[in-house]
Image (tube, rainbow, N blue to C red):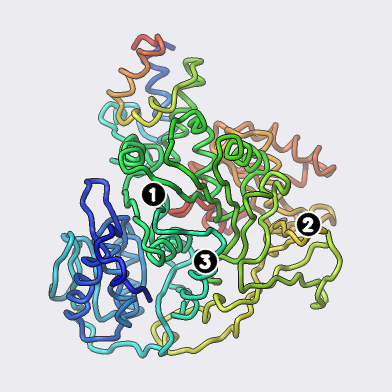
Amino acid sequence: MTNQEKYIAAFTDALNVAAEETAAMQYGQSVAWDSVGHMRLIANLEDAFDIMMDMDDIIDFSSFGKGKEILRKYDVEL
Amino acid sequence: MWNFETAQEHIAAIDDSGATLTYGQLAAEGRTLAGHTDGRCLVFCLCRNDLGSLLGYTAFLNHGIVPALLSAELDRGLLRSLLDSYHPRYVWAPEGTVVAGGACHTAYGYTLTKTPYADAPALYQELALLLTTSGSTGSPKFVRQSYRNIRANTDSIVKYLRLTADERPITTLPMNYTYGLSILNTHLDVGATLLLTRYGIAQKGFWSFFKEYRATSFGGVPYTYEMLDRMRFTRMDLPSLRTLTQAGGKLLPSLHEKFAWWCRDTGRQFIVMYGQCEATARMAYLPWERGIEKIGAMGIAIPGGRFELIDTDGSVITSAYVTGELRYRGENVTLGYAAGAEDLALGDERGGVLDTGDMAKRDDDGYYTVVGRKKRFVKLFGNRVNLDEAERLLKAQYPDADIACGGRDDRLVIYGADSAPMDEMIAYLAAKTGLHPSGFAAKIVAAIPKNDAGKTLYRELETPDD
């Protein structure tokens, strides 16, 4: 799996959405991406990329796009 | 209920846009709002953690109007069926909410709408407030709370938490949920400043609001603390934070320990509490000074309250460390339930005594520990297995798995998302309980259903074919 595929898979698994829906997703905009979904998503990403995110990044992770920027800080190329 | 006139200039609430309401404004705006009603009647309040919602709730309670608190996010179909069952005279809802009837007043983003129902339900004279027990499921069952219930519980909580006007609690729970509401009730009573936010703790907006307005405390249900733990909360720099309270279910002892130690090391107070909507809000608290010594316990009865443990034969248990059903006595024990409009005329059905349905035991020092729900048991091969205990065992072993334990009669079912290692969990539980794995089953679900406050909704989990 490429990093891009892993990134999308983290969303589809945590938020129960189809891969093509992930790119437009934002925290709070869908029922699935609530606080419960958010913590599942973060756990998935940390497992997939073997990273430990800082709290500031966890709470800043507000959309599919913003998440890519944040992961760059952890040397994850997307 | 409250006298807002004593601290007119003091700020009662700040929302996350920075807008404020002083106690004087809250009193004046409340009088205006109440003046647009026909007096004592039933009002549905669709709540959010914002100024308009706070204004409506306090105005109604202070002027003898009975609010039923519901989530503003409540499913519209469920709202319609509640309206049809209870025929409230008014609905107080965020502007733009579609409600049948005529708008009669708008303030702070909320509109009061007079409903078309001609027949108003009769209200018992002491009835103050209606709250649901289940959050977002839209169950037509309400808990009936009296003015005396709210006053008694508020006085106890203010006393044992030693609340003062210097407090600035930040909202983490919905105000239509008993625990969230008790934080509002008690802090308004001492003239403190509420920080109202619609952001959740996993959002940046919450923490910037927290820091900007220097929140001094917050409350959390077990799920809140599980999240804070995963977010590495203890690394955050929050100099204004003094007190963390926990209620709404039993916290994993490992997390209780972790937060109790962190609070002790950083000069804060971590206070575990116990309560139910049926007892207005609180029944017990664990004094923070003993938080570490009594990990896993929920404490002692609040001032004015008293516990008893009842054996299966109905007798009162007198020895320590014997499990029985927890019974509570106090002025905060609510009037009873309402299943429909006609029940709003009912008086006090409980007489100050509440059988909590929780199984608990007491230690030598008189501290109580909840060990499970009375009815949450299965019998595997003749052995009674407490489903809450089983769940805690699994959560302690698999902290990242979102799971719940259910089942019926002679079968324990582990519900989990498909990422959870279910077979491993069955083997683990079987080993822990010393029972054969064939008594356990696993069922994959999309997500564990939880209410607004993060409590697992077991009834929704267990479909009839289980």
Q: Residues within 10 Å of mark 3 (few under 14, many from 20)?
A: many
Chain-order first, disc 1 or disc 2: 1
Q: Nearer the viewer, mark 1 or mark 2?
A: 1
Residue drawn at x 70%, y 70% is: B307
Is B326 located above or below residue B338 in the figure?
Answer: above
> Cα distance, mark 3 to mark 2?
32 Å
- Determine whether the residue tagged by mark 3 lies in a helix, strand or loop: loop
Residue drawn at x 68%, y 72% is: B306
x and y, in percent, of residue B318 in the image: 84, 70
Name the residue that disc number 2 marks.
Answer: B379
- Determine whether the residue tagged by mark 1 lies in a helix, strand or loop: loop
Chain-order first, disc 3 or disc 1: 1
Tell me whether marks 1 and 2 sit on the same chain: yes
Is B54 located above or below residue A71 in the figure?
Answer: below
x and y, in percent, of residue B359 in the image: 72, 63
x and y, in percent, of residue B40 in the image: 29, 86
Three-letter residue code for mark 3: Ala
Name the residue that disc number 1 marks.
Answer: B170
Three-letter residue code for mark 2: Lys
